[in-house]
């Protein structure tokens, strides 16, 4: 009920593209700790960065279920880092530019971003605060026609190799009002260090330092002081895509495991004949399907413009926790082979851990939900 023939055709085309251009290279990109710029160019040529953006800027202006297909197929590549790097560019940085950018900013950053000619990053989290967005310390002080930016960001996807960074700053360290700035990578005083991660290894994740970085006043994104509200607004789409990614990764982990169970024998029969394992599969398959249709329903409501902060937080909470459990159990079903890096479950197990942390931890999701359900708060 959610997908048309056009969606199915797009899925097959995207899957063919990924099998040709991505899967043969995943192992090398995982070792390199980044994906090459040439891949962004290929994605741009195919229109994958412009699925939901206006045609006036080179996008395709398609419905949100093309993005659903996109995230589900990316998950099948078994590289959380791949999805993170591409997603941070198109579903974070470009989303902020599309909604809050001026015409000049869109022409300078959004248009080449959709084409894959420039790479964006979104920088909010800092060494001393992640979940508490209003506690950030990076400041921007007005100096004529520039702002002087000082501070640091951490855990930033594309933090090292991006061309520009959509950055959350405070104009006054004593106040809570947040402003979004577009900061060019080649700005003097900006430096970045790549971080060594447990999972999502194909994405470059960096710690960024700003030391007296001069940013033109025309690089303010949206209205000064409204950054917190922009961040909260876009958290809905981010959490929906994280929920999608968690559900799709769990689904793929189960698919891989079912294939292994058909081929692996113990005590003279395939291990998919053992009741204990069969019942675990039944439980996982049921929970994946329940999550799938809850998320699809929310995607439809999101596309219709409904306010779904609470529900998106619920989806993100449940789907990423499910992914954790499924990857754990699927690795167990592989036995000793599940612990080997030559088999896919080792990476799935490592990558699944970030789902309950990035984009708002499970604990923060619960607090948001509790405040809305118990206290009647509206975000």
Image (cartoon, grey):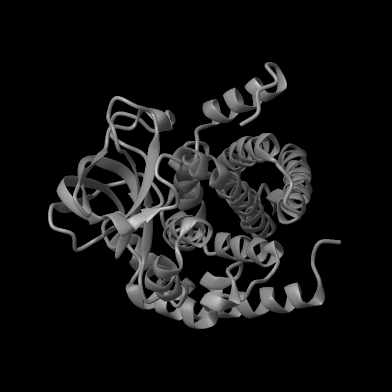
Quick one: which residue is furthest to the right in this view? 1
Number of residue marks: 0
Taking depth in this image into account, of 154 and 101 the one nearest to the observer is: 101
Taking depth in this image into account, of 253 and 354 the one nearest to the observer is: 354
Quick one: which residue is furthest to the front in this view? 144
**Above/below status of 371 relative to 182:** above
Is 281 left, or right, of 75 in this rendering?
A: right
Is 4 left, or right, of 191 in this rendering?
A: right
Is 55 left, or right, of 230 in this rendering?
A: right
**Above/below status of 17 relative to 53:** below
Quadrant placement of the C terminus: top right
State the image coordinates of residue 318 (x, y, percent, origin top left): 65, 36
Place residue 88 in its image quadrant. bottom left
The reply to whether residue 327 is in sight is: no
Taking depth in this image into account, of 334 and 323 the one nearest to the observer is: 323
State the image coordinates of residue 148 (x, y, percent, origin top left): 19, 46
State the image coordinates of residue 55 (x, y, percent, origin top left): 59, 77
Taking depth in this image into account, of 349 and 69 the one nearest to the observer is: 69
Q: Identify the residue at horizontal 48%, vertical 83% (top origin).
A: 45
Is 303 left, or right, of 80 in this rendering?
A: right
**Above/below status of 249 relative to 24:** above
Quadrant placement of the N terminus: bottom right
């Amino acid at each position: 009920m959610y997908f048309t023939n056009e969606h199915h055709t797009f899925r097959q085309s995207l899957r063919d593209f990924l099998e040709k251009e991505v899967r043969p290279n995943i192992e090398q990109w995982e070792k390199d700790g980044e994906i090459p710029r040439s891949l962004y160019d290929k994605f741009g040529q195919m229109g994958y960065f412009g699925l939901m953006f206006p045609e006036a800027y080179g996008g395709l202006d398609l419905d949100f279920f093309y993005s659903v297909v996109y995230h589900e197929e990316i998950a099948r590549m078994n590289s959380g880092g791949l999805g993170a790097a591409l997603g941070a560019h198109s579903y974070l940085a470009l989303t902020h530019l599309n909604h809050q950018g001026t015409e000049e900013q869109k022409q300078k950053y959004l248009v080449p971003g959709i084409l894959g000619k420039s790479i964006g990053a979104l920088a909010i989290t800092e060494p001393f605060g992640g979940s508490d967005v209003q506690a950030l310390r990076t400041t921007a002080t007005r100096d004529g026609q520039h702002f002087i930016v000082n501070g640091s960001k951490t855990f930033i996807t594309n933090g090292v190799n991006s061309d520009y960074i959509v950055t959350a700053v405070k104009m006054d360290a004593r106040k809570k009002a947040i402003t979004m700035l577009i900061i060019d990578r080649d700005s003097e005083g900006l430096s970045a260090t790549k971080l060594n991660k447990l999972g999502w290894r194909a994405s470059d994740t960096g710690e960024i330092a700003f030391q007296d970085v001069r940013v033109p006043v025309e690089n303010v994104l949206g209205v000064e002081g409204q950054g917190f509200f922009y961040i909260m607004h876009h958290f809905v789409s981010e959490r929906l895509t994280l929920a999608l990614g968690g559900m799709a990764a769990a689904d793929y982990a189960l698919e891989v495991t079912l294939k292994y169970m058909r081929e692996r024998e113990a005590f003279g029969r395939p291990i998919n004949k053992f009741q204990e394992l069969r019942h675990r599969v039944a439980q996982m398959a049921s929970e994946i399907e329940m999550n799938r249709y809850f998320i699809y329903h929310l995607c439809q409501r999101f596309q219709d413009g409904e306010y779904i902060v609470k529900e998106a937080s619920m989806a993100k909470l449940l789907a990423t926790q499910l992914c954790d459990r499924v990857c754990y159990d699927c690795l167990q079903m592989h036995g000793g082979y599940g612990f080997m890096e030559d088999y896919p479950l080792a990476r799935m197990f490592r990558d699944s851990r970030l789902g309950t942390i990035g984009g708002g931890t499970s604990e923060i999701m619960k607090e948001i939900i509790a405040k809305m359900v118990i206290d009647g708060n509206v975000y």
